[in-house]
Image (spheres, grey):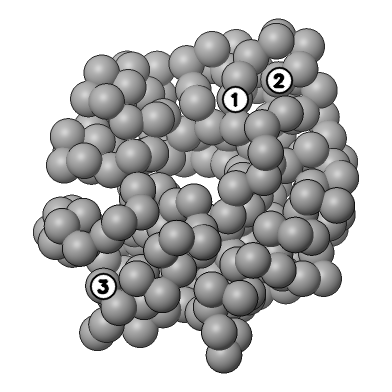
Amino acid sequence: MAAPQISPSILSADFARLADDVAAVSGVADWVHVDVMDNHFVPNLTIGLPVVQALLKHSALPLDCHLMIEDPDRWAPQYAEAGAGSVTIHAEAAKAPIRTLRAIRAAGARAGLGINPATPVEPYEDLLGEIDMLLLMTVEPGFGGQKFLDLVLPKIRRAREMIKGRDLNVWLQVDGGVSAETIERCAEAGADVFVAGSAVYGADDPAEAVRRLRAQAER
Ligand code: DX5
Ligand code: ZN
């Protein structure tokens, strides 16, 4: 398993000061998590490709783009081509996930597959060789600040076993309700990349919040 990585979600940052809020965690975080929502796949609307393109010029950290959109097959490769370090598409939305994941990798980004809390992971086992990261949602996607769903913990364990069983270097990301209270449970279950929005940007000192989360994940 890889060393724990922290990916602060700018969904809980100040959208009018994104570059500053990214700078606040540069040097301590591993990634910046960017939640792209289209008001179709999820009932919320955030930012899209133009903002990601602009942010790339101002971010010292690689962008971890999480596409909660209805048509990832069309859009995901463009985020990779723009220079995102990682692009995650949702299993529930992609119509041609293998083609899209391959296009993300071909454009030089890490390819991620996202899975909602109620979606089983087993049907996607054969795709593990096509991805660099599996994202398990630990809340229903769409909003920051929701309560962590403990019912996903067994799926995190099963996913870690699947990855181990195939001897693959696939990162296992958890997203939603990850905080000082829940991160140890996620790490113990086998997660190694931790998205945290409100736990980082809701704190007085976001950099210190990232350091603390990492220390807890390393325990
Ligand atoms: C929710 C997003 C998350 C969100 C997490 O759909 O995918 O990345 O920002 O926020 P917290 O950490 O506050 O639950
Ligand atoms: Zn996210």
* Residue where numbered disc 3 is placed: 19
The secondary element bearing badge 1 is classed as: loop
Q: Are marks 2 and 1 in contact (CB under 8 Å)?
A: yes
Query: Residue 138: x and y, percent?
Result: 69, 56
Q: Which residue type does callout 3 highlight?
A: Ala
Residue 163 is marked as 2
Residue 170 is marked as 1
Left or right of 185 on screen, residue 77: left
Q: Which residue type does callout 2 highlight?
A: Ile
Please determine whether, in this image, residue 146 is positioned above or below residue 34.
below
Gap between marks 2 and 1 measured at Cα: 7 Å
Left or right of 71 on screen, residue 215: right
Comparing 142 with 165, the one in front is 165
Comparing 113 with 86, the one in front is 86
Image quadrant in which you'd find residue 57: bottom left
Specify the farthest residue to the bottom: 204
Q: Are marks 3 and 1 in contact (CB under 8 Å)?
A: no
Q: Is residue 144 visible?
A: no
